[in-house]
Amino acid sequence: MYFCGVKRLVPALLLFVLCGCTTNPGRTAPPPEQPHGFQVTYAAGTVAGPAPEAPGAVRGGVITQLSPSDFQSLDPAQMNVDNEFVAGELLFRTLTGTRTTASGDLEVVGDLATDAGRSGDNARTWTYTLRDGVRYADGRPITSRDIAYAIGRGFDPKLPLGRRVLQQWLAGRDDYPTAYQGGPTPPGVRTPDDRTIVFTFDRPRPDLPFVATQTVTAPVPADRDTKERYGTRPVASGPYQVDSYTQGEKLVLKRNPAWDANTDPLRHQYPDGFEFVAGLSPAAISQRLVADQGPDQTATTWSSVTPELLPQVVDHPDVARRVTEGPTANVQYLYINTKRVTDLNARKALNHAIDRDSFVKAMGGPAIATPATTLLSPVTPGYQAYNAYEGGPDKARELLQGIKAAPLTLATANTPTSQRRAVAIKTALERAGFLITLQPVDPQYYYATVSKKENPYDLVLAGYSGLWPDGSLTLQSQFGELRDGGDNLSQFDVPAITARMAQLAAEPDHTKAVAGWARLDHDIMAEQAPVVPLTYIRSYTLSGSKVGGISLSRTLNLPSLRDAYVRGS
């Protein structure tokens, strides 16, 4: 699982660099990545529902999602990991959403709202009008006040996870929780009537239409809010609702009878339901989906095919055609806690010492991952290839001369897959003279644990993905604001870097901004070494033979379920 971020946009039309997904025809390794550009637009006016039909789709049946671990939270204000956002597409609707056009471009459209937003005062003010007929699962109409209330929940420090860009913008500062402790509406938000919500910011925010796609704008009825427990039984606004949920084991979704396809331009309601089964080993998941027997013919997964089973996939066309694959914006890092590992030479030595080839093997090989040396992924606009640390173990040992070799604690999720990867890191670092102690952490609460500002780990194995791949918030989220539950796992706090980020975030010329973020990528690594980039992640997942409509989400970096259906049911 990976953290998700969102990035800065400029108005109207941009050219972005990403790669689409493909179907694996039986290769032993992927071809060289050749990123291609596509346009990102904000749809003008209303995009009406229903969503275009998925080719070959039929209604009925149940799709099972097999997973090693459960969700951290199904509270839309606390969703923080890619798989949670994918499940969120089934449970919740947001003010806006994204879709892929017939030409392959990405378009932001109105979801609960009639359109992508209407701006004024040089994008300091944005107005949204809700569609007619949008309702919760209990049949009650969704109102603008429900969305305002949901956004207000995002200010609550007792709900520490989730994306908080919108709250920071509304507060006009990073310490957003101090800006709102309850009341009719949060700062910068007005609801003139039940169908209208207006946002006012202290500076131009031309990228609000995309930020409004985040689940923090999913409506929450105040009288059903159970605060910290809301994620166990959230109120649905999407095509499915929670039927039953045993945390750590199984989530069952059933149809939401109040969902109206005619009001939704983005989603379908093909299956009768979904079952999310947690607690399975990645090896068991891969074995079951390769075998494709019985109920597993209607199963799918977000877990990559395990290395030992890759030959059974790539060498058998009938299995390979069931793969969903493609490059993503995910990057796997070894985060260095800069509050604990304070010596810059030690951090640089960690970068020199790492053996990326062994880590790629531990990840599953080139079908799953390729070596990374940068903070930004190659599918990010402005990406520049570099490697600031090519010296190898000898250079690491040279830098470590005179540094007392204290053991470093490496946190990793307590799963066989993560432990295998941690061993590859430990072996490489100890070869260069480091002392490494592995510390397994419960995978269900892994990110909630390692993202605490006060934690006992020197090194953290984790990843980051951009909901909208760009240098801005990919870097700002990880190396800017330092707060509990945030994405800054390196505990990185360098005022000069923060000042540069502020300047780039205010740059009106997008071309200059893109180049500036790429330069900052290099400078953070060369001057501060707060992480060890390990691999760029590819999606390489299997589905059963009776599952259709699965495709790699361009914004969530995992296979999406919103067009999924059961063949022949």
Image (spheres, helix red, strand yellow):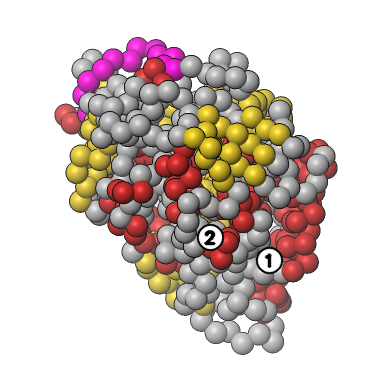
Please state if 507 lies on the left or on the right of 378 as rendered. Answer: right
The image shows residue 217 at horizontal and vertical percentages of 48, 42
Residue at 30 percent of width and 48 percent of height: 224
Range of the magenta residues? 49-64
Q: Is residue 424 left or right of residue 200?
A: left
Residue 460 x %, y %: 50, 66
In this view of the protein, which residue sits in the foreground, 21 or 368?
Answer: 21
Query: Where's the C terminus, which quadrant?
Result: top left
Position in image of residue 410 (x %, y %): 47, 70
Tag 2 or tag 1, which sits nearer the N-term? 2
Residue at the image point whose x is 39% and y is 17% from the top: 262
The residue to which callout 2 is attached is: 180
The residue labelled by disc 1 is 529
Q: Quadrant of residue 242?
A: top left
Quarter assignment of residue 423 = bottom left
Q: Is residue 145 visible?
A: yes
